Image: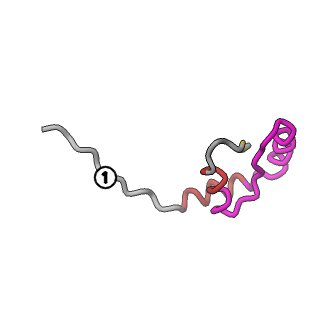
Amino acid sequence: MVFAGNSHKVEDVLQAAGSRIPVCRSFVEARKAVRWADKHPHAYDALFDWLERQPRPQLPLPLTAG
């Protein structure tokens, strides 16, 4: 279950993945989202499969002392 927060990042990831997972903005929506999730477990599998296919960030190695 996804809750809207003070950042758009999670919602942007869902949109980029083409996911239909609902974003909750209230307790009432959360209760509906739990029922939706029970009926649509494949939506979460598809999201995590999509995430696994994304390129890993190439972060620089930390500098070591001395």
Residue 38 percent location from the top left of the image: 82, 45
Residue at position x 78%, y 44% in the image = 24
Residue 14 percent location from the top left of the image: 67, 56
Position of 18 relative to 31 (above/below) = below
- Residue holding disc 1: 60
Residue segment shown in magenta: 14-43
Residue at position x 85%, y 38% in the image = 31
Magenta includes 33? yes
The extreme left residue here reads 66
Residue 8 percent location from the top left of the image: 63, 50
Residue 13 percent location from the top left of the image: 62, 56
Position of 14 relative to 30 (above/below) = below
Q: Main secondary structure of the magenta part?
A: helix
Position of 20 relative to 38 (above/below) = below
Q: Indicate left or right for 43 with 49 as reference.
A: right
Magenta includes 22? yes
Image quadrant in which the C terminus is located: top left
The extreme front residue here reads 6
Residue at position x 65%, y 62% in the image = 17
Image quadrant in which the N terminus is located: top right
Give the residue type at disc 1.
Pro
Give the colour scheme of this rendering.
secondary structure
Q: Secondary structure at mark 1?
A: loop
Please tell me how crowded label 1 is: few (under 14), some (14-19), or many (20+) other residues with Cα within 10 Å: few
